Each structure stands twice: as C-alpha cells, then as structure tokens.
Amino acid sequence: MARLPEHDCALLAEVCRQARLSRDARFDGQFFTGVFTTGIYCRSICPASPPHEKNVRYFDTSIKAANHGLRPCLRCRPDSAPHSYAWMGTQTTLQRAVKLIDAGAMAGDNALSVEQLSEKLGISSRYLVKLFNQYLGTSPKRYAIYQQVMFAKKLLHQTIMPITEVAFAAGFNSVRSFNDAFKDALLLTPSALRKSVNPLQNDSGSARQFAAGSVNLPITLTLSYRPPLNWQAMYDFYHLRQVSQMEWLRDHTYGRSFDLDGVQGIFELKHIDSKAQFELSVSFVRPADSRYLANVVNAVRKLLDLDADMATIEHQLQQVKVLLLNNTARQNLLSDSSIKTGLRIPATFSVFEAACRAVLGQQVSVVQATKLLNTLVAHYGELMVINQQAYRLFPTPQTIASASLDELKMPGARKLALNALGQFVADNPQSVPVDWLNVKGIGPWTVAYAQMRGQSDPNLFLSGDLVIKNRLKAYCQKYGVTLDTAKQYGELADDIAQQIAPWGSYLTFQLWANT
C-alpha cells in the first residue's frame, strides 16, 4: 500500500481516535476520518465497524479528505455533518469567505465570481486564492462546487426531489454541469447514487411523486448538530414570544412562516434528541422556489445556532471571573451548576424583525412586548395561504414605514421610531444595524439586540440591559460590594466583556436564564 499522508487536523490524533471509536457526537463535523483501505472518509459518528488505526488519517475538513482522493461514506453521510470553523483559528477573513460560500454566495443565478467575492471581503482575489490554497489545498471556486455537490448528495439521500430539481436546489445552473461536477467529485452519477439509496426508485418516478402532492408538498430533510443543545430552553424562549399565525409551537416542534429575499413559505422543525438532529420540513408558496432550498436550510441552521461549538463556549463561560473592586479577590461569575448547558442563541429570521422586537420591548415586560408584536403582525403582516391554511409574514420595512401604528398601545415616540427605522431600511436595504444609530429613537441597546438575534453575532454582551445590570449588581452585593457609580459598573462590564470574548452573546443568555 502506498505511504499514507500525514494527519491534517487541528485536533490531536489520539483525541480523534477516541472520538471515532466511541462515536462521540460532540466531535461531529470537527474532523473526518479518511479510511485509505476503502477509499472513503467518515464522520466521528459513523455506524460502520471502525477500521484499524494504521489505515486511517484525520482531516479537519471534508474537502481535505477529498483532495486525497477519498469519497464520502454512504452510511454516515458526511454531507449531513454540522459545520465547524475551528480549523480556521484566527483567520477571520477566511472564515467570512467560507461562511459566505457555504451560504450560497458562489452558487445559483446570482453567483459571485472570485473577484466579486474578494471585493465584498475587501481583499484582492490573489490573496483570497492564497488563503484557500494555504488552509484547504484548493481554490475558492472548487471549494464552492464541492459544497454544492455535498448538498445535492444530501438531497438525493433524504428527499424524493427529482434529479433536475436537486441540481437547481444545490445551486447549479444546468443539469449537465451538475452531473459533471457530481461525477468528478464522487466518482458516480446522481442517478446511480439515488438507485443505491432506493433501488426501486427512478428519477421519473420520484418526479411524478414530487409533483403529485400539489405545489406545496413539503420537502423533508435532517439537520445535525453537535451536542449539547438545550432544546427545552430554546423552545420555551420562542414559546413565550410566539406570534400567532406567524409561528406555532406544539409537541416540542417549532414552525414559522418566512420571506427570504422574496422566497416565501413555511418550515417546521421536530427535535430528535437521540440522534442530535432536527427533522426539517419546508413548503414553498411557489414550486420553482425549491431551487432556493439551500438558502432556507442555511437560514434555519443560523436560526437555531446549530453550528455553535458549545464545548469551547461553555469552557470559556466557566473561566469568567469578577474582580470585586478590592483588587485582590476574583470569583467565578457562573458556577458549574449555574451554567445551563447547551444554551444557544435563538435567532430571528431577519435582522429587521429583531430590531422591531427590540423597539417594541423597550421599557415593557416580555409578555407586553409579545402582545404588541402580535398586534403589529396581525395588522401589517402579509397574508399567505399554503394548503388552505392562512399564515402571516413579518411586515416589510416598506409597510412599517407607512403604517399608522394606531393599533399599538405604546408611546408615540416609539411608533415614530418604528416608522423611521422602516423608512431607513427601505431606503438603504444594504444597511447594517450600526447604521441605524442615525435613526431617531434607535439606540445602542436596540442595535446590539438586532446584531445578536438578527445577525447571530456571538459576541454581544448586553451590559446595558436592565436585567443584566440587576444580575451583576446582585452578584456583587452577595460578596458585600456595592456598585455606587456608573463608572464602577462600566469598568466591571468592560472587564467581563474582555474575558468572555468572542462569546459575549452566550453570557448574555446565561444571565437572562439565571434571573
């Protein structure tokens, strides 16, 4: 046998060995096992009999394994593994590039070229190519195509979508280019893979079945994550803030309507704790919009924070210590017993929605804010019908800009702030939350909340939040320390923010949950 390559993984080989032998789901997606005797690569949770250690090598990305001529395992399906960006370390530019490509920036009708992606990142195309070659051993374009192929493989495994629909849903502009890329990457055709999954199913049969159920037949697939995930806490969080006709929660499933850049539909999520998965069902208003399925899947993964590395985050939470103003004693802010394990960021479907929720929630309880939000959606949300069931979409910025908001029982200044925010976002659709500080009535807390829940920014420690302030003051009083001035509190908050970076948002949710 030819000499095997060296391990190419940030994790120690012994850690990977123990994880694969125990099928540890906490490492799912953080590394892949290349089995050179069979020519395949697997996830840490692969159910197949584990190969001998002398025959394997470990890679921290699937494409590194593919670069060595390995194909994805048909049993554990690496295409279904949760994303992991730990291998990029401090390479924030590369991380941004990979996340944009994973979200479909270089796929579909509006695909960016390497030059356009580089311009968006503020770097030269030459430097971007250099980063990809250095850390992944491939070009940005080849990386993008491989991600499209892997998503297509997932759809062929898990859905009854015809191959033509799969090709467009994965971001290819023609079936021919899809077939060529698929065969080049996996050494078999899409139709051969589908037959291996279900020998009795051919593409024409699946097409008839796909079309027979009506234009709104749900597409169902699974989303994996790395444990722990506290679904009960997330479910309760959404349930308390539920908006009628826009969201529904029952039997520990969560569903809602969505409008993603004009692509409208509904989705529903069912948690499967034993498998560290969610079952996702998506129905589109327009059948042709199934080509945007990858965008919806990425948005849902972001909504539930499914790609968070909770082991790393919770380790840092345990390290945060408060200096109790005598410059000698530091105490853990959160004890091991007070950390709610698996607590993630429950996001909103858009950053504008998060901002509106923040404005409505100013100086009122969560219950009162939710009542206002329900009124807002009921009066200004577009009505959408799927399978004879009526749903509401969250109001658009244009609608909010011109709305009277007379139905909302809240101060006039806050109504004007909502109008102004809607107008600003409508006039500046590419604006980001920081830009909204120019809008009268929109302050730093609202912007930070929108960044945290609307953009899933992991590093927003909301020290200005009233609940957080009271929590920290109560903690200090426990040790006989009183925060008498704003300066003292500010110094304490800054110290904590520096310690918890880049995971300030997770500390925010921990402190909210511990009140």
Image (tube, grey):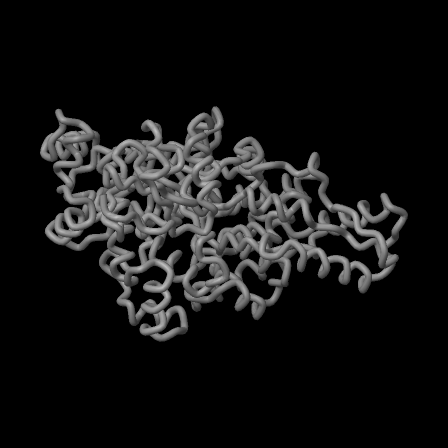
Frontmost residue, 216 versus 122 = 122
Frontmost residue, 361 versus 260 = 260
Q: Position of residue 481 (x, y in %)?
A: 88, 51
Q: Residue at x 71, y 43 (%)?
A: 334
Residue 109 lies in quadrant: bottom left
Classify 31 as above or below 116. above
Q: Position of residue 82 (x, y in %)?
A: 40, 42
Q: Residue furthest right?
A: 480
Q: Residue at x 28, y 64 (%)?
A: 112
Classify 174 as above or below 369. below
Residue 380: in sight, yes or no?
no
Residue 50 lies in quadrant: top left
- Residue 456 is left or right of residue 490, and the answer is left
Q: Residue at x 28, y 31 (%)?
A: 75
Classify 490 as above or below 157. below
Residue 319: in sight, yes or no?
yes
Q: Residue at x 20, y 43 (%)?
A: 166
